[in-house]
Image: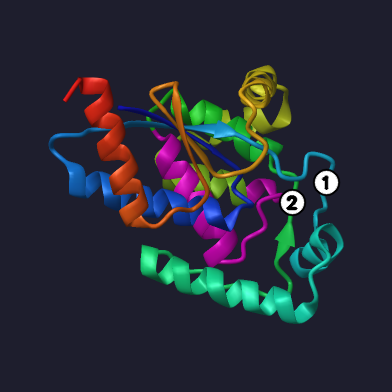
Amino acid sequence: MKIEIVSDVMCPWCVIGYKNLTQALAALEPKLRAEISWQPFELNPQMPIAGQNMREHLLEKYGMTAEQSDSNRTHISELGAKAGFSFNFADDGIMINSFDCHRLLAWAQEHDKQSELQMALFSAHFTDNKRLNDRDTLLTLVEQVGLTRDRASEILAGDDYRDLVLGEQQRMRQLGISAVPTFIINDQYSISGGQPVAAFRQALAQIQAETSGA
């Protein structure tokens, strides 16, 4: 089964969805095996490189009150813990322009390291409150998953993978995708949002049965 995950590293529901997806896939093995790839989506393509305080950004973009923001953080943290991921929201956490992260992920895919790097980015941002607009931070994460720091530095210093990322983003828009996470299954089915494990299991089993003729 081919699964494309349309995602932004700034999206907490993307990591919750992915972790629940992997649990569902583990429960369905060995009958169902998946080939997973990540496709780029920028929640804030106009965000300056310096980023913006996360709480301030959410208040401005979605009109949340501080109380609603706190409640949202608590809810996400609880779902994350259930999925096996730790969210440690900090008052000085920031929302960034994630384009360079997507370029590195496109490169990582060529070396079968895409999911590893994606999870490293998620953990750095949401668990460790690292600044993903800091080049040294990105280079350290690249090294941690077994990729080459020097090559990553070249990518970040130039325009490599720019057109690829832009092209994939355009393809996602043409498919009508306007929110993340979205899970595209076998090029013809989609599952939206950070669904619970049971919902993924049911949907994937149904798709498997339909495509296999069972």
Picture quarter with the N terminus: top left
Pointer 2 and pointer 1: residues touching (CB < 8 Å)? Answer: yes
The Cα atoms of the two marked residues, 2 and 1, are separated by 6 Å
Q: Which quarter of the picture shows residue 180? A: top right
Residue 132 percent location from the top left of the image: 66, 51
Q: Residues within 10 Å of mark 1 (few under 14, many from 20)?
A: some
Q: Is residue 76 left or right of residue 166?
A: left
Q: Which residue is mark 2?
A: 96
Which residue, as the protein is rendered here, is positioned at the far left? Answer: 30
Above or below, 71 against 5 in this view is below
Q: Is residue 4 left or right of residue 177?
A: left
Looking at the picture, the colour scheme in use is: rainbow
| Residue depicted at x 39% and y 57% | 196
Where does the magenta region start and end?
Answer: 113-136
Residue 167 percent location from the top left of the image: 66, 18
Is residue 127 rendered magenta in the image? Answer: yes
Q: Which mark is residue 131?
A: none
Residue 39 percent location from the top left of the image: 54, 31
- Residue 84 visible in the picture: no
| Residue depicted at x 54% and y 27% | 106
Q: Secondary structure at mark 2?
A: loop
| Residue depicted at x 19% and y 49% | 27
